[in-house]
């Protein structure tokens, strides 16, 4: 049985659990998030999903969050439907992160929506002001393991980010990118076909 089939089967129970969590303050919800790693398999994933529904700015259906995932500033995070974020990923939504439908983010990847400046020489670099930039991951994207998606990046639809890549600029639709920094490796579909399939 696929994950989305399990989700449909238990949707009433998930809705009830999410509603119950609305009674709890956010610090308690964050404590439950840390504790969820102690729950095995489906139980832990279900609890993390219910917590994300409560904590995120917006969260769709059929979301799988693996163990060890850290999400900072979840109130600035938008997640679509059918999204998987695998174990030990680090998501910092300080500058805003939007993840569309049908996105898979493999284990130990990071999305960081801000960067440090270093212009004020009277301060250590770590104490210089931050500059934010929203990360936008469009629909039908696969991000391989150990990737780094940096501030202000847009990964357009039906694209693949190869394992170990550091993405510093926009990824065109229908493209495989890889490397440090990530560069296009090949197109995975005819130019413009993705946009036509969306009816645009």
Image (cartoon, rainbow, N blue to C red):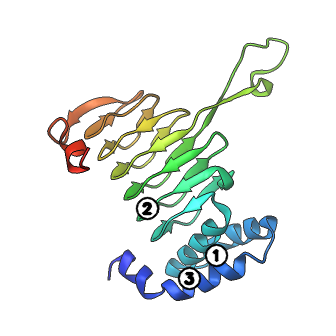
Q: What is the x, y in percent for residue 27? A: 81, 65
Q: Residue at x 48, y 42 (%)?
A: 136
Left or right: residue 189 versus residue 42 is: left
Instruction: Tell me whether the residue at label 3 lies in contact with that at label 2, contact meaning CB atoms closer than 8 angstroms.
Output: no
The residue under label 2 is 83
Q: Which numbered disc flags the more N-terminal residue, 3 or 2?
A: 3
Left or right: residue 37 versus residue 26 is: left
Write down the quadrant of residue 96 in the picture. top right
The residue under label 1 is 38
Q: What is the x, y in percent for residue 90? A: 58, 50
21 shown above or below 144 = below
186 shown above or below 10 = above
145 shown above or below 68 = above
Q: Give the camera-side residue of 127 and 83.
A: 83
The residue under label 3 is 14
Q: CA distance from mark 3 to mark 2?
A: 16 Å
| Secondary-structure class at tag 3 | helix
């Amino acid at each position: 049985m696929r994950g989305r089939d399990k989700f449909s089967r238990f949707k009433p129970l998930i809705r009830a659990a999410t509603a119950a969590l609305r009674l709890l303050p956010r610090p308690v919800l964050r404590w439950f998030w840390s504790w969820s790693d102690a729950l095995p398999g489906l139980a832990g994933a279900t609890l993390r999903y219910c917590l994300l529904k409560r904590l995120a700015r917006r969260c769709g259906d059929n979301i799988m969050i693996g163990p060890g995932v850290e999400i900072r500033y979840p109130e600035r995070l938008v997640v679509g439907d059918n999204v998987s974020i695998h174990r030990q990923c680090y998501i910092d939504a300080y500058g805003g992160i939007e993840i569309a439908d049908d996105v898979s983010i493999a284990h130990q990847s990071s999305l960081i929506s801000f960067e440090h400046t270093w212009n004020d020489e009277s301060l250590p670099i770590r104490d210089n002001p931050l500059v934010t930039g929203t990360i936008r991951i469009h629909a039908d994207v696969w991000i391989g393991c150990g990737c780094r998606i940096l501030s202000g990046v847009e990964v357009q639809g039906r694209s693949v980010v190869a394992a170990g890549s550091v993405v510093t600029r926009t990824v065109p639709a229908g493209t495989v990118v890889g490397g440090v920094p990530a560069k296009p490796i090949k197109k995975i579909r005819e130019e413009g076909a993705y946009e036509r399939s969306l009816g645009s």
